[in-house]
Amino acid sequence: MDKYEENILRLNKKIRTALLLVETKNRKLKQENHVLVEDVANFRVQFAQAEDGRLRCKAVLEKEVARSHEQHEAQLLLKKRYNDLIREYVAQNEKLKAAEHAQAKEVNKQSRLKRKQPPVEIIGEESLIHLQIDHLEDTNERLERQVKNLKAQLDQCHCVPLTPDTANSLTASLHQPTL
C-alpha cells in the first residue's frame, strides 16, 4: 500500500474511534437526559403535592385567624362589660356606704334626741332608709353575681380579669384623659 492509502486507513481508524467515543457519550447523555426527565416529573408531582398542602394550610390558617379575631372581639366585649360592672359595683358600694353613714348619723341624732325628749316613734324616715339599704344590698348581691359570671367567662377566654381590689384604680384610670 502506498502512503496515501495508509493515511486513509489511519484516518478511518481515527474516525471510527472518534465515532465510537461520540456514540458512547451520546448513550450516556441519553441516559442522563432520561434520569433528568424522571427527576423533573417527580419534582412536578412533589410540587403539586406541596402546593396542595400549602393551600390546605392556608385555608386552615384563615379559619383560625377568623376564629381568633372573633374570640378577641368577644373578649373585648366581655372586658368592657366587666369594667362596666366593676364601675357599677363601685358606685353601688359607695351609695351603700353613704346610706349606711347617713343611717348611722341619723341613729346617732335620734339617740341624742331620744335622750333629750320623751320617746317618740318615727315611722317614715327610718323605714325608708331600711328599704333603701335593702334595695342597695340586693343590687350589690346581683352585681357580685354578675361579676362572678363575667370572671368565669373571662377565665374561659384565657385572660386575667381585674380584681375588686383594683377596681378603684381602674375606674380612676378610665376617667383620666388619653393622649
Image (cartoon, rainbow, N blue to C red):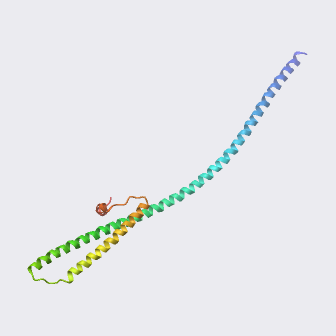
- Viewed as shown, does residue 124 lie left or right of 51? left
Kindly identify the residue that appears in the image at 36 percent across and 67 percent down: 147
Farthest residue in the top direction?
2
Splitting the image into 4 quarters, where does residue 63 fall?
bottom right
Splitting the image into 4 quarters, where does residue 2 fall?
top right
Kindly identify the residue that appears in the image at 74 percent across and 39 percent down: 34
Indicate the position of residue 113 as horizontal and vertical percent values.
11, 79
- Viewed as shown, does residue 53 lie left or right of 145? right
Residue 107, compared with residue 152, is above or below; it is below
Indicate the position of residue 121 as horizontal and vertical percent values.
16, 84
- Viewed as shown, does residue 169 lie left or right of 72? left
Q: Which residue occupies the foreground of this view, 30 or 70?
A: 70
Farthest residue in the left direction?
116
Kindly identify the residue that appears in the image at 88 percent across and 19 percent down: 5
Indicate the position of residue 67 as horizontal and vertical percent values.
50, 60
Q: Quadrant of the C terminus?
A: bottom left
Indicate the position of residue 53 as horizontal and vertical percent values.
61, 52
